[in-house]
Image (cartoon, coloured by chain):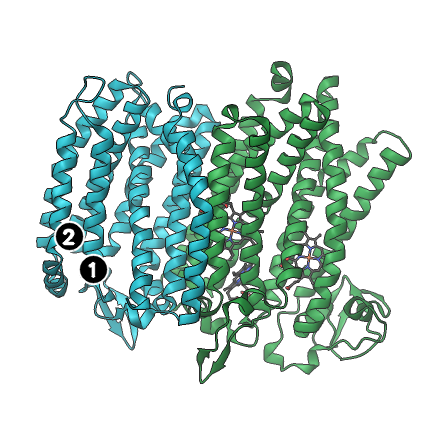
Amino acid sequence: MEASIIAITILWSFLYIYSMLGSLDFGAGFWGMIYGRKNNTGASLIANRFLSPTWEVTNVFLVLFVVALYSFFPFAAAMLGILFILPIGLGLVLLTIRTTFMVFSHSVKRYGRLLQVISGITGVLIPALLVSILPVTLGGFVTMNNGEPELLYGKLLTSFTTYAHILFGLCTQLFLSSLFLADYASVSNDQKAAQLYRKHAIMAGPVTIIVAVLTLFTLNHEASWFLANAEKQIYGFSMSLLLFLFGYAALFLKNSNGKRGLFRYAVIFVVLQYGFAIYAYGASHLPYMVYPHLSINEAFTNPSMFYALLLASFIGLTILVPAFVLFWKLFLKDKRYLQQ
Amino acid sequence: MYARALFGSSLVFHIIYATLGVGLPLIIILGEVMNLITKDRHYAIMARRITKGFAILIAVSIASGTIVGVLLSLLWPGFMEMVGQVIALPFLIEIFAFLIEAVFMSIYLYAADRLSSPMRLLSIVLVAIGAVGSAILITDAHAWMNTPDGFRIVNGEVVDVDPLDAFFNPSFFTTAIHVTVSAYMTAAFVMASVAAFKLLKRNKTNEERAYHMKGLTMALVLGAVMSMATAVNGHETAQMLHEYMPRKLAAAEGLFETRTHAPLAIGGFTDEESESVLFAIEIPWALSFLAGNRFDTEVMGLNEFPKDEWPPLFVHTLFNVMVGIGTLLLLYSLFLIAWKFVLKKSFKPWMLAGLTAGGPLAIIAIEAGWLFSCIGRQPWTITNVMKTTEAATRSNYVGLLFFLFIGLYIALLFITSFVLYTYFKRNPVIKDLKEG
Ligand code: HDD
Ligand code: HEM
Ligand code: HEM
């Protein structure tokens, strides 16, 4: 494999991890807000119990993605910086508000509800902003002015495809998080909350798939190159659909408690579903980062830096694996934490 | 223009929280260790209360750190191109330091009751290692901007990249130590400030006073040790400037003519017209000694450099503020320690009142130091390699973002103070002391 392909694969894997963690994080924030008041089920409690120890780790993966992007592809800086400064800048403001308010709401109980609502709302807006970047990279929204790229905000804001992408992002977030929280609640032995989240997952699943397919039809004619590439990845996309069906079916099977929902299997299948879809999407996107102005080879760093980065990532991840295992045991498995 | 203002103010904001984020874990460790040694539960309570405050501050530290991290790439594309090719390593490794800190911070915060004492100590030690690691690694990138190494430029292209040479650039070790010890010093004086403030209030029970006194003593000793280390290492940092960044040293001291037996100017304002520092106290020969440990060391003056490469001359004041506060806090903490342990007398109210200023002063010194280091490097972003104007973005939206972020920072400063105040108001020490 070419070095630049290895690098983009690593980067894409970080994006995959972040999109999964981010969906859980933002989605849990949303459910925490929705169920914050009527505490008749433990739904809000479950969401917050998951969020408290994990948001910090999720946030680091966001930074990891950004740093890896500029480390492996430094020549992308000029174009990406100019194109996305506004959406990303606004996203940062909202992210800061969300992070700080979420943490503060634990310390000042009196204003806790207000802080929680604000962080829940920003938790919906941030993914919307982030996802709106995707259609831009597919082509049709960028012009070149004397060698300087410019984002056509008017066109972006009035395009149907932008909103289709955003809708897809939000559905994904709600689907993944309700599925995961159903599992988390079930492990925590809160069957009521588990069934509540199961209901949401059953709704959100098919809607997400339908929106995903519809989104493909809304793409600009400039993005036809992408559709042509995507046809070659048909294997990956079909695998993804198949895994979705497995995961969805698992929601209707009985678990050991006699209730419906083999949640652990459902989560695993759906995470794999997104894995196949995201890598197939990424493969279709190559070789462009921003069509047609920036390709991965133009943006790639020099070989000696590439190998140094590769080695550092490898060593870093090896050190971290035991830490993650410990983390998993303490917060996602330990009955004393889950059932307190 | 707005790019510099936006990035500079974001860092000024981040650095307050980041410095405390590096320093406070050490204080929590000290509390935990003292608790293990003395079995005095006051120290356990102290560690727990500081952890609560730390959890609030770290949220802002992480959020603002995410901002600077992402803004760096958005605002300085020219600079990032160079960073990605030459000095990407510390940025990437830093993420692993963050992850260690994040994972063990959650463990320490939310799993403390399920861990044994040694495991709890281990997790807070790992938090401290993660925090100081991230500070050292970002400082590495900063040091490389001051003393770039590990590459050559041929026809405008970067060639012969050696990532390790870049990583271990000449000023890395000195600067990293300086940032670390000054962060510990700052956290210690912030803690001393709080304890002194509480002791000044009259309506406290004897047990509360004893509790605050222990905190004060611990912070004072740590503060004295760390400010000693900061001063000694600051001396080395100045010698590093003399060797690698003579232009910055000349601007720091307002020295125009190259000479031996150069005097050290304290205070005053550098005046370009008369090529001197007005209203300053001059210590003869001291600058030469500072720079090379010998009075006949030749120190370069600003006139050796083209005028359009001079940094703004007010950096003299920034440098003075940092060194002045460092010296003051060192002497004051030594004096208080001698008063208490050698003369065995108890503190007078005015002494405590003086000490309450210590924390804010240390933070001012930190800010002055960073501003000095960054502005003293101007007009270069990477010394002698890339000018600031080449590094900046040409986007039109930076102005808008600037005002948005400034609003955010001001709001957050107030909100964090409010949250800390409310939290500790509703959970006073006395409550913890009673419950044990
Ligand atoms: C509590 C904070 C604090 C205190 C008391 C001091 N410093 Fe400092 N200093 C810093 C906090 C700091 C800093 C904020 O951490 C800087 C900014 C950039 C850096 O690397 O460290 C710094 C930078 C810095 C530089 C510039 C390095 C560069 O541009 O690369 C020099 C020459 C000194 N220091 C020297 C001193 C001396 C001689 C001190 C005498 C006591 C001193 N500092 C006290
Ligand atoms: C250009 C300068 C800087 C950049 C780009 C930067 C970047 C970042 C980022 C991205 C984070 C968030 C990490 C997370 O998600 O957990 C962060 C947090 C932090 N930074 Fe900064 N930083 C800078 C300056 C500094 C300095 C000078 C220090 C030390 C004195 C420092 C110390 C910290 C600490 C302690 C944290 C929070 C703890 C953590 O999450 O690990 N940073 N910084
Ligand atoms: C954390 C403490 C820091 C503070 C308070 C600080 C402050 C500033 C300020 C005020 C400027 C604008 C200078 C001017 O307009 O004259 C600036 C510029 C800049 N700083 Fe720093 N800085 C810090 C550390 C860093 C670090 C650690 C890095 C990089 C890793 C960095 C990278 C830059 C860059 C790229 C610029 C823009 C170019 C330039 O003006 O040199 N700074 N900083």
Percent from the top left, x then y, of residue B27?
Answer: 65, 37
Which picture quadrant has residue A282?
A: bottom left
Residue B11 vertical placement versus B213 (above, below)? below
Which picture quadrant has residue B424?
A: top right
The residue under the point 38% across, 43% down is A58
Question: Label 1: few (<14), some or many (≥20) within 10 Å?
Answer: many
The residue under the point 80% across, 79% down is B259
SS label for mark 1: helix
Query: Which of disc 1 and disc 2 is earlier in sequence?
Result: 2
Which colour denotes chain B? Answer: green
Residue to which mark 2 is pinned: A236
Q: Residue A269 carries which label?
A: none
Residue to which mark 1 is pinned: A283
Subunit that carries the residue with mark 2: A
The residue under the point 29% across, 55% down is A12
Residues tagged 2 and 1 counted as in contact (Cβ below 8 A): yes
Subunit that carries the residue with mark 1: A
* Quarter of the image that includes the C terminus of chain B: top right
SS label for mark 2: helix
Ligand 3 quadrant assignment:
bottom right
Residue at the top extreme, as displayed: B434
Q: The chain drawn cyan is chain what?
A: A
